[in-house]
Protein backbone atom coordinates (compact mmCIF):
# COMPACT_ATOMS: atom_id res chain seq x y z
CA UNK A 1 0.00 0.00 0.00
CA UNK A 2 1.58 3.26 -1.11
CA UNK A 3 -0.82 6.16 -0.53
CA UNK A 4 -0.47 9.26 -2.67
CA UNK A 5 -1.66 12.82 -2.28
CA UNK A 6 -4.96 13.08 -4.18
CA UNK A 7 -4.22 16.59 -5.37
CA UNK A 8 -0.53 16.42 -6.32
CA UNK A 9 0.29 12.72 -6.61
CA UNK A 10 3.27 12.71 -4.23
CA UNK A 11 3.70 10.70 -1.04
CA UNK A 12 2.23 12.41 2.05
CA UNK A 13 4.78 14.42 4.04
CA UNK A 14 4.32 12.25 7.14
CA UNK A 15 5.08 9.21 4.99
CA UNK A 16 8.37 10.73 3.83
CA UNK A 17 9.62 11.08 7.41
CA UNK A 18 9.18 7.35 8.16
CA UNK A 19 12.45 5.74 7.13
CA UNK A 20 12.30 2.21 8.53
CA UNK A 21 10.31 -0.79 7.38
CA UNK A 22 8.72 -1.14 10.83
CA UNK A 23 7.60 2.49 10.72
CA UNK A 24 6.08 2.06 7.25
CA UNK A 25 4.30 -1.09 8.43
CA UNK A 26 2.81 0.75 11.41
CA UNK A 27 1.71 3.63 9.21
CA UNK A 28 0.12 1.23 6.70
CA UNK A 29 -1.78 -0.41 9.57
CA UNK A 30 -3.06 3.01 10.66
CA UNK A 31 -4.21 3.71 7.11
CA UNK A 32 -5.97 0.33 6.85
CA UNK A 33 -7.71 0.78 10.20
CA UNK A 34 -8.68 4.31 9.19
CA UNK A 35 -10.19 3.04 5.95
CA UNK A 36 -12.20 0.42 7.85
CA UNK A 37 -13.50 3.06 10.25
CA UNK A 38 -14.30 5.42 7.40
CA UNK A 39 -16.29 2.72 5.59
CA UNK A 40 -18.47 2.19 8.66
CA UNK A 41 -18.95 5.93 9.10
CA UNK A 42 -19.91 6.29 5.42
CA UNK A 43 -22.62 3.69 5.99
CA UNK A 44 -23.80 5.56 9.07
CA UNK A 45 -24.14 8.88 7.26
CA UNK A 46 -25.61 7.37 4.10
CA UNK A 47 -22.76 7.75 1.61
CA UNK A 48 -22.41 3.96 1.20
CA UNK A 49 -25.26 1.42 1.22
CA UNK A 50 -26.05 -0.36 4.45
CA UNK A 51 -25.62 -4.17 4.28
CA UNK A 52 -28.87 -6.11 4.24
CA UNK A 53 -29.89 -7.44 7.62
CA UNK A 54 -27.69 -5.11 9.64
CA UNK A 55 -29.33 -3.02 12.32
CA UNK A 56 -28.24 0.37 13.58
CA UNK A 57 -26.93 -0.97 16.91
CA UNK A 58 -24.62 -3.36 15.03
CA UNK A 59 -23.31 -0.52 12.86
CA UNK A 60 -22.64 1.56 15.98
CA UNK A 61 -20.76 -1.36 17.55
CA UNK A 62 -18.73 -1.77 14.36
CA UNK A 63 -17.96 1.96 14.28
CA UNK A 64 -16.80 1.90 17.90
CA UNK A 65 -14.68 -1.22 17.36
CA UNK A 66 -13.12 0.27 14.21
CA UNK A 67 -12.42 3.53 16.04
CA UNK A 68 -10.75 1.72 18.95
CA UNK A 69 -8.63 -0.37 16.56
CA UNK A 70 -7.57 2.74 14.66
CA UNK A 71 -6.72 4.58 17.89
CA UNK A 72 -4.56 1.65 19.07
CA UNK A 73 -2.62 1.65 15.79
CA UNK A 74 -2.18 5.44 15.94
CA UNK A 75 -0.86 5.20 19.50
CA UNK A 76 1.56 2.44 18.44
CA UNK A 77 2.78 4.58 15.51
CA UNK A 78 3.22 7.61 17.79
CA UNK A 79 5.16 5.53 20.32
CA UNK A 80 7.38 4.17 17.57
CA UNK A 81 8.10 7.64 16.18
CA UNK A 82 8.81 8.93 19.69
CA UNK A 83 11.28 6.07 20.20
CA UNK A 84 12.94 6.89 16.87
CA UNK A 85 13.18 10.58 17.81
CA UNK A 86 14.67 9.74 21.21
CA UNK A 87 17.21 7.43 19.58
CA UNK A 88 18.18 10.16 17.10
CA UNK A 89 18.51 12.67 19.94
CA UNK A 90 20.69 10.28 21.94
CA UNK A 91 22.88 9.62 18.90
CA UNK A 92 23.29 13.36 18.29
CA UNK A 93 24.12 13.93 21.98
CA UNK A 94 26.76 11.21 21.91
CA UNK A 95 28.30 12.79 18.81
CA UNK A 96 28.34 16.19 20.50
CA UNK A 97 30.02 14.73 23.60
CA UNK A 98 32.71 13.09 21.46
CA UNK A 99 33.28 16.36 19.62
CA UNK A 100 33.52 18.24 22.93
CA UNK A 101 36.13 15.81 24.27
CA UNK A 102 38.18 16.08 21.06
CA UNK A 103 38.01 19.90 21.12
CA UNK A 104 39.07 20.00 24.81
CA UNK A 105 41.97 17.65 24.07
CA UNK A 106 43.05 19.87 21.17
CA UNK A 107 42.92 23.00 23.36
CA UNK A 108 44.90 21.33 26.15
CA UNK A 109 47.41 19.92 23.64
CA UNK A 110 47.92 23.35 22.11
CA UNK A 111 48.37 24.85 25.60
CA UNK A 112 50.93 22.16 26.45
CA UNK A 113 52.75 22.76 23.18
CA UNK A 114 52.77 26.51 23.88
CA UNK A 115 54.21 25.96 27.37
CA UNK A 116 56.89 23.60 26.06
CA UNK A 117 57.88 25.99 23.29
CA UNK A 118 57.92 29.05 25.57
Image: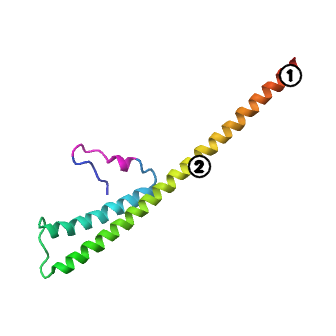
Q: Toward the viewer: 66 or 12?
A: 66
- Quadrant in the picture for the N terminus: bottom left
Which mark identifies residue 65? none
Magenta span dominant secondary structure: loop
Residue placed at 38% from the left, 62% from the top? Answer: 74
Picture coordinates of residue 83, whole percent (x, y): 51, 56
Picture coordinates of residue 80, whole percent (x, y): 47, 58
Residue placed at 46% from the left, 55% from the top? Answer: 81
Q: Residue 101 falls in which quadrant of the image? A: top right
Figure label count: 2
What distance separates the C-alpha of mark 2 from that of mark 1?
37 Å
**Which residue is denoted by mark 2 in the rendering?**
90
Q: Is residue 72 above or below residue 105?
A: below
**Which residue is denoted by mark 1 in the rendering?**
115
Magenta stretch in the rendered image: 7-16
Q: Residue 43 falls in which quadrant of the image? A: bottom left
- Quadrant in the picture for the C terminus: top right
On the picture, is 5 further left or further right than 83?
Answer: left
Picture coordinates of residue 100, whole percent (x, y): 68, 37
Q: Is residue 72 above or below residue 111?
A: below
On the picture, is 85 further left or further right than 40?
Answer: right
Amino acid sequence: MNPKCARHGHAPVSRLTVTTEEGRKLQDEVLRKGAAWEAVVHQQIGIEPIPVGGDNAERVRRAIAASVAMRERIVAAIDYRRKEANDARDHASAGYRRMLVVMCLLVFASMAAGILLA
